[in-house]
Amino acid sequence: MAGAAGPGTGPGAAGGDGDDSLYPIAVLIDELRNEDVQLRLNSIKKLSTIALALGVERTRTELLPFLTDTIYDEDEVLLALAEQLGNFTGLVGGPDFAHCLLPPLESLATVEETVVRDKAVESLRQISQEHTPVALEAHFVPLVKRLASGDWFTSRTSACGLFSVCYPRASNAVKAEIRQHFRSLCSDDTPMVRRAAASKLGEFAKVLELDSVKSEIVPLFTNLASDEQDSVRLLAVEACVSIAQLLSQDDLEVLVMPTLRQAAEDKSWRVRYMVADKFSELQKAVGPKITLNDLIPAFQNLLKDCEAEVRAAAAHKVKELCENLPIEGRETIIMNQVLPYIKELVSDTNQHVKSALASVIMGLSTILGKENTIEHLLPLFLAQLKDECPEVRLNIISNLDCVNEVIGIRQLSQSLLPAIVELAEDAKWRVRLAIIEYMPLLAGQLGVEFFDEKLNSLCMAWLVDHVYAIREAATNNLMKLVQKFGTEWAQNTIVPKVLVMADDPNYLHRMTTLFCINALSEACGQEITTKQMLPIVLKMAGDQVANVRFNVAKSLQKIGPILDNDALQVEVKPVLQKLGQDQDMDVKYFAQEAISAVAQRLRKLDFPVKGSEEPSAPGADKNHFLRPRGPGEDTGKGPAHQLHVNTRDTLAQLGTAELVHFSRSRD
Amino acid sequence: MAGAGGGGCPAGGNDLQWCFSQVKGAVDEDVAEADIISTVEFNYSGDLLATGDKGGRVVIFQREQENKSRPHSRGEYNVYSTFQSHEPEFDYLKSLEIEEKINKIRWLPQQNAAHFLLSTNDKTIKLWKISERDKRAEGYNLKDEDGRLRDPFRITALRVPILKPMDLMVEASPRRIFANAHTYHINSISVNSDHETYLSADDLRINLWHLEITDRSFNIVDIKPANMEELTEVITAAELHPLQCNVFVYSSSKGTVRLCDMRASALCDRHAKFFEEPEDPSSRSFFSEIISSISDVKFSHSGRYMMTRDYLSVKVWDLNMESRPVETHQVHEYLRGKLCSLYENDCVFDKFECCWNGPDSAIMTGSYNNFFRMFDRNTRRDVTLEASRESSRPRASLKPRRVCPGGRRKKDEISVDSLDFNKKILHTAWHPADNVIAVAATNNLYIFQDKVN
């Protein structure tokens, strides 16, 4: 705990008289009740500091009773409290006294806010491990029973999460009681509680004896799986995974499979969706034999379900399902029992289904091998590349690497190109953005020749897109391309085109040149940067638009580290100094920033700036000796980023002097 | 219609006598617009009664415990908590004012010692927590009992605050705000029996929410045509089934009700059942469509029936029979001849609500002139009662009222022409277990009970 600074070197430290180290603790205690939530939260987060100062005795007898009744507070305070108490055992006197923490956590386990309740349960689970077996039965188990038979369903839902931690360590008689309580919660009147029980069923099953699993958990599972509320039934599917792992194949067939089959054909689409969504887990849990006999037919049905949500969830699982099949006979199963259904989905009416399939279908090629891919999958990929929905095309393109490994991308390139071009010019900028992000990947796989021939012009066109996000992405894309294809390629194909834009009548395009230079300089190296880029940047310092000029300053700062000292001293410095006296406030500001950065690099070199003795205005840049001259200069109205600098300072102060600020603010 | 039933009122097998219990709200003739009650709702136990008004306020009344020493004061409702639920807002993007009026209140099933309700105006649904607090922490380290600051250097010992009992305080705090999901005006909210979701309906769409998630809702019904000029009907009300978490109904301005099953598919654009009574061609008129518009739909507590209210009647449907209602009760048939003037003063668009009693044996709905109607489903008897200050002596029995449909007026009858159409009872609520009803008459809330023998 970070807050242990100050008095608490040992328990009982609170006794010292006139000890002013008590002061910060006193503040923390008082602020447990401050009107400001933030201060209360702050105090709660330093609860360990308070407890340390009070000593274990007073923590148990005074602090904890007080905290037990503070459940009126805001959720975030309660959440922090619930979390703190989970690590509090040491502060109340060790495992022998761990039970003292139960009352406050018990009251937190009944609040209506799920996150708080869950955190309280989590802390209770943590603390349960610190109880001795005797204390567990004397204190913890009664708490679980109280919660389980509470009047309000919030307490009963919390109880569901506690059975599995106390069961393994309880005596046989208590075990029977615990099972009885769990059983009754599984048939609780409120669906909330049944849902909580259903979601903990698997976890509880794992700690039970196998006989009890068969004789008690399975019937509960069967009941929950046929609950009248579909919100309960769907949670039983999850429990199915855990229970299936515990049973032998024969038991599984008799005890679980009827229910699972029923779930896969449930009337409610949400239950079927859950089966589709958990398919891989189910597949692993039931093993290969049942998978072949039962799950594959069920999966076929899910792939042609009448509800699109279900089909989409199933489509997402196609690859995992195929991967997890036993290698022997895998190909035949896929070809005969899965692929025919996938083919149908390629022309599904719902675009979410198609795009879900497109995001995984490419993965099948590695499983099926070259010939099958060319014969069976390729036609599907090609159809999907022509799909009317851009997301489908994008998903195919984004997974090209899988196919590349198997058949080489050339097979696809004829169809790929029109698809890429169309996406590149899509009316929706988010679609354009998505395809840009795949460009480096595509370029790597298609090779430099193909790229230069077909795609380079697209990449350059994006630089003048009318959406900033696209121009920005295009800039980053260029950088990645250079990393891939090398500097020579950059010098020949990219750099000239970028630099031409410096003379564009549109200032946004001129700025794009600067952004490109920022991104490319490092990848291109010193020579290209100094010889080709720097002159253009320096020339632009005279631009009539202030935004361009301050971006020149930023660019110079950015490329500074790549340039040699000579260039910095002779070429960059004068230009920055000139910009430092610009009419525009922002240009001046960024010029200063750049100057100080460059100065750091030329540490030994003298940067003469006159008027450095001037007292700096509060909030001004730290390197005040670099502030530009100018007698009538208004230091007060700095641009907004000065404020930013200021806040950063204050925050830094706060960070280093957590406790000190209390005493200072109260003097 | 058998309007001539005796002095008794329906509910249960024996006729029972309703008597005045309480009236809430100002007595003034001048009614402030903001004070007009816009919704009334009992919670699941009936111990709390919430009202919302056009000023965006929610007032919650709590039923007093039965008092042995004063047997006549049994079950009075007193103010428990009052809070401002919604404020007037302005949508700058659409240049629209958003009224603060509370359209609906729905209680959540109780989950811990606190109570929760959903309240909504036209656009935004809020989840409120109403909780009690009876302890207060005392003792500061840096302050004396009287609030004077202590010298920081003279703190010699740490004090941990102690909780002391204090007077009961009821707090209402907003827990969640479900906003930005409705383009049109929200007319209904309904909490699901799964205790984790609820639906909200506006004129053209129905959304399904998770009670803990405010930034996402699922659209389950959308009847907006691609071209708004082709719009022929709107959603007027929607409700979830009280027991089956996957079933809900919504009513339309064309007098029909659709029942949807959320199990069948994620989008419920296709209904599972369609309830419509064939129109009688002989009574067709200019007003047919307007008066057939359904203003409220409510499932019975058993979940077997539902009730719909249109302008002139209230109908009970068996969920298993879509072709016609099993019962039709005329609420104020005598107005059929006056539809023209009711159209002119816009009354024909009034949205009357309806409600069931606890055992589903009787139903209640409002009318004009501060009259409200009750129908006993077993005895087929009905009665018209009046919410008025004139009979507001404690324990005074309510006298049945009769409206004379025209022609010669008998003694004790009221002529149709003398009805006050500004005094309308749109919102009523029936205690879920007892014979206690709450009737909102403009800015007053009347509470009536059955007479104990």
Image: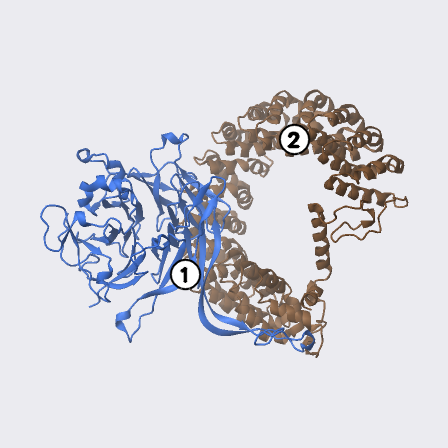
Q: Is residue B70 left or right of residue A158?
A: left
Provide residue A276's location: percent of width, then percent of height: 50, 40
Residue at the spot of label 2: A436
| Mark 1 closeness class: few <14, some 14–19, many ≥20 residues within 10 Å | some
Q: Is residue A539 left or right of residue B177?
A: right
| Quarter of the image where one finds residue A406 | top right
| Quarter of the image where one finds residue B44 | bottom left
Cα separation between marks 2 and 1: 56 Å
B443 up-or-down from B219: above or below: below
Q: Report helix, strand or loop for mark 1.
A: strand
Q: Chain of mark 2?
A: A
Q: Residue B43: tell me if it is visible.
A: no
Provide residue A169's location: percent of width, then percent of height: 56, 65
Q: Report helix, strand or loop for mark 2.
A: helix
Closer to us: A424 or B403: B403
Q: Amino acid at mark 1?
A: Thr
Residue at the spot of label 1: B82
* Chain B shade in the render: blue
Q: Is residue A125 left or right of residue B3?
A: right
